[in-house]
């Protein structure tokens, strides 16, 4: 469950990412004192920084501002489910070497590709994600599963996340 204040959510996400206040400050182009003030709820980030912060933490701006926890996997009742054509598959890879891959695809596009026999390209160089079963992800989404399905942080610092939103 995410914390109640914006500052607490910034701290939580920064620690989850394993970075310092200085590293976050450098990434968004502010002073480390500014980050400290945010985290202690003495001030808030400029509104123009919110998308950059959310992207860096791999969460939505809504999750950053409201604390909506999209990382929890849920199976929704049919009455609560989003239209399958509006669901997104998000794959995030942050390697220790500094490589960053963010893939945001409509699940319906992935399904069409699989239905016509298209081969989904394999991710080279990262054993953690080279064998993703996209058909299983589509079946899960069609059954009402949403949230962060996979979150792996390897011993060497690679981070892999797969989410259905």
Image (tube, rainbow, N blue to C red):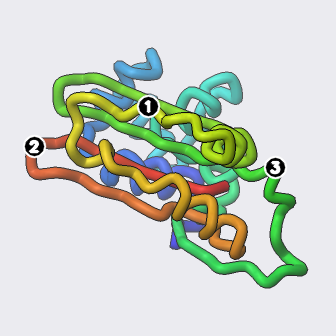
| Mark found first going from the N terminus, 3 or 2 | 3
Where does residue 127 sit, x and y in percent of width and height? 21, 43
Disc 2 crowd rating (10 Å Cα; few below 14, some 14-19, many 20+) is: few
Q: Nearer the viewer, mark 3 or mark 1?
A: 1
| Residue named by callout 3 | 86
Please name whichever residue, 47 or 112, is drawn nearer the observer in this view of the structure.
112
| Residue named by callout 1 | 121
Q: Is residue 76 above or below residue 105?
A: below
Q: Is residue 26 above or below residue 127?
A: above
| Mark found first going from the N terminus, 3 or 1 | 3
Residue appearing at x 60%, y 62% in the figure: 70
Disc 3 crowd rating (10 Å Cα; few below 14, some 14-19, many 20+) is: few
Where does residue 89 sit, x and y in percent of width and height? 60, 47
| Mark found first going from the N terminus, 2 or 1 | 1
At mark 3, the secondary structure is helix
Please name whichever residue, 63 or 150, is drawn nearer the observer in this view of the structure.
150
Q: Quadrant of the C terminus?
A: bottom right
Farthest bottom residue?
Answer: 77
Disc on res. 156: 2
């Amino acid at each position: 469950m995410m914390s109640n204040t914006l500052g607490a959510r910034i701290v939580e996400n920064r620690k989850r990412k394993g970075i310092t206040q200085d590293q976050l400050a450098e990434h968004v182009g502010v002073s480390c004192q500014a980050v400290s003030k945010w985290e202690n709820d003495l001030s808030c980030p400029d509104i123009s920084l919110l998308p950059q912060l959310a992207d860096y933490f791999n969460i939505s701006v809504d999750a950053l501002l409201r604390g909506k926890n999209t990382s929890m996997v849920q199976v929704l009742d049919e009455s609560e489910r989003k239209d399958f054509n509006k669901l997104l598959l998000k794959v995030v890879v942050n390697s220790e070497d500094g490589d960053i891959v963010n893939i945001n695809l409509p699940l319906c596009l992935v399904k069409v590709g699989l239905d016509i026999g298209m081969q989904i390209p394999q991710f080279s160089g990262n054993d953690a994600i080279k064998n993703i079963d996209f058909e299983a992800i589509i079946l899960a989404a069609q059954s009402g599963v949403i949230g962060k399905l996979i979150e792996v942080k390897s011993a060497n610092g690679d981070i892999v996340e797969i989410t259905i939103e």
